[in-house]
Image (cartoon, helix red, strand yellow):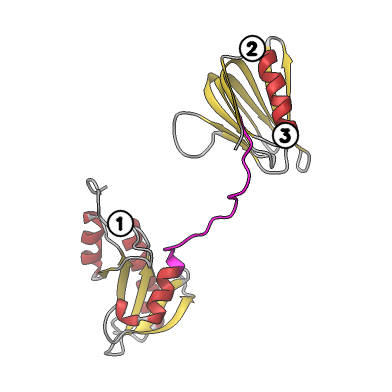
């Protein structure tokens, strides 16, 4: 992978490198003090601040601050990147035509510019996913408990699709919610909603069980499961998953 990095470039130096990087189809990052204007389906404006701009060769543009994982402004793939020096600032624009949208980032100071010739590695092979965990349950239902019989996956209910629906050794309906990571009370609440939905479908007085199949749960989730009469079964995804190692305090 080729890489070019400029520290504290002048606006003209940054412009020349941007134009060359656009031509090469590089992945580009710029960090510095800038304003951000968006005009399109709506309008937004950000005053001066230190931000990171990421420009991808597919046309994506992402503006990041020092908080959160999502950009504060962005443009989707298919946009066109342009750069110019105007009024003593480096202007970088990402323009989309359908619908008409413009992301305008104007740098008063560029602290760093980097351009990377990134190739390959675009496809991600996911292992240990919830789909893998579902396959494991279907191949070996005893992962849930001995005598469990899976009858359907993605079973529709008025609370949404249920990962695995089946019956236990005594014939009671069992709702199984699959999670590949350590989970909190949201997952317990989701399972409770599915169980309630099946109870509304079954004859009055039918006991419907709920099982949360996950590597581990937080203390709050465990308490909510107990309050709702639901169960947790510890099970790792096929790749070993993510258990409690290194886990801190419960949320």
Residue 147: quarter of image: bottom left
What range of the chain is rendered magenta? 115-131
Closer to viewer: mark 2 or mark 1: 2
In the rendered structure, which disc, 3 or 2, sits on the residue that comes first in sequence? 2
Residue 48: quarter of image: top right
Secondary structure beneath dot 2 equals loop
In which quadrant of the rendered image does the N terminus lie?
top right
Q: Residue at x 54, y 55 (%)?
A: 124
Query: Relative to residue 35, is residue 206 drawn left or right?
Result: left
Along the viewing direction, whichever of 151 and 124 lies nearer the viewer: 124
Asked whether residue 24 is in view, the answer is yes
| Residue where numbered disc 3 is placed | 24
Residue 115: x and y in percent read 62, 30
Along the viewing direction, whichever of 74 and 230 lies nearer the viewer: 74
Q: Residues within 10 Å of mark 3 (few under 14, many from 20)?
A: few
| Residue where numbered disc 2 is placed | 10
Q: Residue at x 21, y 66 (%)?
A: 226
| Residue where numbered disc 1 is placed | 185
In the rendered structure, which disc, 2 or 1, sits on the residue that comes first in sequence? 2
Query: Relative to residue 17, is residue 30 drawn left or right?
Result: left
**Picture layout, residue 18 above or below residue 234:** above
Residue 47: x and y in percent read 56, 19
Query: Relative to residue 132, is residue 214 drawn left or right?
Result: left
Closer to viewer: mark 3 or mark 2: 3
Secondary structure beneath dot 3 equals helix
């Amino acid at each position: 992978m080729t890489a070019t990095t400029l520290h504290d470039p002048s606006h003209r130096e940054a412009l020349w490198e941007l134009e060359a990087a656009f031509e090469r189809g590089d992945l580009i990052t710029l960090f510095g003090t800038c304003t951000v204007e968006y005009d399109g389906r709506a309008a937004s404006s950000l005053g001066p601040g230190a931000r990171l701009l990421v420009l991808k060769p597919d046309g994506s543009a992402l503006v990041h601050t020092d908080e959160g994982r999502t950009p504060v402004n962005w443009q989707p793939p298919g946009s066109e990147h342009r750069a110019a020096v105007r009024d003593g600032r480096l202007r970088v624009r990402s323009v989309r035509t359908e619908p008409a949208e413009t992301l305008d980032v104007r740098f008063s100071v560029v602290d760093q510019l980097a351009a990377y010739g990134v190739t390959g590695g675009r496809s991600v092979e996911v292992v240990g996913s919830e789909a893998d965990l579902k396959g494991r349950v279907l191949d070996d239902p005893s992962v849930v408990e001995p005598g469990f019989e899976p009858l359907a996956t993605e079973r529709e209910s008025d609370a949404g699709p249920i990962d695995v629906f089946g019956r236990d050794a005594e014939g009671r309906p069992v709702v199984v919610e699959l999670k590949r990571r350590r989970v909190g009370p949201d997952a317990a609440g989701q399972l409770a909603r599915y169980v309630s939905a099946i109870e509304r479908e079954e004859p009055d007085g039918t006991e419907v069980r709920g099982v949360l199949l996950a590597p581990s749960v937080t203390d709050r989730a465990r308490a909510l499961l107990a309050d709702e009469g639901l169960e947790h079964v510890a099970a790792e995804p096929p790749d070993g998953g993510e258990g409690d190692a290194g886990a801190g305090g419960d949320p």
